[in-house]
Amino acid sequence: NAGVTQTPKFRILKIGQSMTLQCTQDMNHNYMYWYRQDPGMGLKLIYYSVGAGITDKGEVPNGYNVSRSTTEDFPLRLELAAPSQTSVYFCASSPPGRSTGQGSGYEQYFGPGTRLTVT
Amino acid sequence: AQSVTQLGSHVSVSEGALVLLRCNYSSSVPPYLFWYVQYPNQGLQLLLKYTSAATLVKGINGFEAEFKKSETSFHLTKPSAHMSDAAEYFCAVRANAGNNRKLIWGLGTSLAVNP
C-alpha cells in the first residue's frame, strides 16, 4: 500500500490564484482530514469527511473547499489565495475500526504534506 | 473546551540521556491517546497509542508512554536518547463528541539531542 499520498509537494501561488491540493489513500479508510500546520501553532483542522459524499467544516475552513466523491480521494480547493494561506498542508485518513475495545481506530495516517507559499 | 497541553515547546537532552516529554489532556469520555513524531519536512508518524488496554504502552524506536488517569497525563519517555530522535513530537486525544474520529492536538514539543 502507498498509504496517503499528496500532490504537489511544493507550490508557489500568486495572490488571487486558485489551486487544488490532491490527497489519495489506498487503505479503504472512511475518515479523511485536512490540516494546516504553521510554526508553533500545531495542527489546525480545515475540513474532514466521514465517508464518500459527506464533508464538514473543521476549525479553520474559511477560504477552502473540499469534495469527497470517492472513498479514496479528498481534494482541497483554495479559491482566491491569500498570504495567510501560506502553510504546510497535511491530509490524513483513519480506519473505521471497531466501535469498542482495543484497537478501535481513531489513529490517523498522514501524507507527506504540501508546502504552499502565497506571494 | 477539550484540550491537550504539552509542557515545554522545546526540550534539549544529551545523547544517551533520558527523554521525557510531557502531555496532559482533558476528556469527558474514556480517552484514547496518541503520540506522533514528525521529522523535518515529513508528515506525522504514529509512535504509539493508548486505547484502554495496558496503561504502559510501548511504541516504535524504543519509546513508551504511561497513562495515568488520576493525573490526566500521558507522558512519553525513552531511556536513552539517540541523535536520530531529534524531531517534533505531538500528543493527541480523541475528541469527546461526534462520530467523526477527530483528534485534539497539542502544540508539539521540539526535541533536540546534543552530542
Image: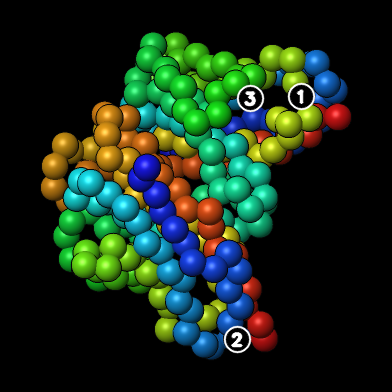
- x 52%, y 81%: residue: B81
Name the image quarter holding residue B10: bottom right
Query: What residue does disc 1 label?
Result: A82
Please report whichever mark, 3 or 1, sits nearer to the chain's N-terminal start: 3
Query: What residue does disc 3 label?
Result: A21
**Which structural element holds mark 3?**
strand
Query: What residue does disc 2 label?
Result: B14
Amino acid under label 2?
Ser
**Mark 3 or 1: the one toward you:** 1
Q: Tell me whether marks 2 and 3 sit on the same chain.
A: no
Asked if the residues shown at circle 3 and circle 1 are in contact, with their CB atoms under 8 angstroms apart, the answer is no
Q: Quadrant of the N terminus of chain A?
A: top left
Q: Position of residue B20 (x, y in %)?
A: 45, 76
Q: Position of residue A50 (x, y in %)?
A: 34, 23
Subunit ID for the residue under disc 3:
A
Amino acid under label 3?
Leu
Q: Tell me whether marks 1 and 2 sit on the same chain.
A: no
Asked if residue A85 is positioned above or below residue B73 in the image, the reply reads: above
Q: Position of residue A56 (x, y in %)?
A: 42, 19
- The answer for how far apart the CA atoms under marks 1 and 2 are is 42 Å
Q: Position of residue A16 (x, y in %)?
A: 80, 16
Residue lying farthest to the left in this orientation: A101
Name the image quarter holding residue B54: bottom left
